[in-house]
Amino acid sequence: MLPVLQIGPAAVQLSGLLLLAGVWIGSLLAERQARRLGLPGDGVERLILVALVSGVVAARLGYAASYPEVYLRRPVGLLALTPFTLAPDVGIAAGLIASWVYGQRKRLPLWPTLDALAPGFAAFAVCLALAHLASGEAFGAPADVPWAIELWGARRHPTQAYELVASAAILLLLLRLEPGQTLPGFAFGVFLGLTAGARLVIEAWRGDSVVWFESLRAAQLVSLAILLGALTLLRHLARSSPRPAR
């Protein structure tokens, strides 16, 4: 765990730096994939920018709405460069809506655009796992397995490492998919399905899960729903693919 990186007199939050690296690398991969798919690379790049700006602003305002007394007393806190004072659900919703509106206005085709974004999402997931390793977040439950790590006063499952391995494997698989050899939407469906499946499994070893109704892990329920949606999409694509002539 290395939450702060000391560079001379400056102290930098390593997790935030890794997230920024994930955005940058993900954007580069998405732009490259967009051009391989025959899409305007700058259009996809601007879509990412619109989603990011809208998402970050909405996430900060959503967090501020939960703690109004703090920000009314010190409004400059709205400009703080810290990823821990964001409301992720609000930010994701706002980013999705903004990117949808932008994509419709620029007439970007839905499924090819999502296919172009898939490797970028996977690259960001790799950097997110590294950020969790650096900060100690998303930690595992106490365990006595030989590969357990010492964290927060106990030996735990290295769920951040599990997350990193799964995300890296998904990224490598997506990068091996050749444009034109799969139907539009396939790469995105593969990314969704594998990511949701990995989260469904890894969540069983997490030590910080949100639990609903005293026994159900919220992330597993959401992951299961996404996995079923991804399988439905892939099944639809398989049925709609042209049959070879006999």
Image (spheres, rainbow, N blue to C red):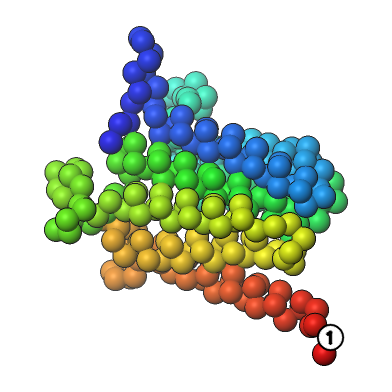
**Residue 148's x, y, as percent?**
20, 52
The answer to whether residue 106 is left or right of residue 21 is right
Residue found at the very far top of the displayed protein: 9
Q: Could one spot residue 57 in this view of the protein?
A: no
Q: Report the quarter where the N terminus lies.
A: top left
Residue pointed to by mark 1: 245
Q: Which residue does the image show at 56% across and 57% down from the upper left?
A: 173
Work out whether residue 222 or residue 199 is closer to the camera in this orientation and state it: 199
Q: How many marks?
A: 1
Work out whether residue 29 or residue 63 is closer to the camera in this orientation and state it: 29
Above-or-below relation of 106 to 227: above
Q: Which residue does the image show at 76% across and 78% down from the upper left?
A: 240
Q: Which residue does the image show at 59% across and 64% down from the upper left?
A: 190
Q: Quadrant of residue 134?
A: top left
Q: Report the quarter where the C terminus lies.
A: bottom right
Above-or-below relation of 7 to 60: above
The answer to whether residue 73 is left or right of residue 110 is left
**Residue 238's x, y, as percent?**
70, 77
Circle 1 packing at 10 Å, graded few (<14), some (14-19), many (20+), is few
* Type of the residue with mark 1: Ala
**Residue 79's x, y, as percent?**
52, 24
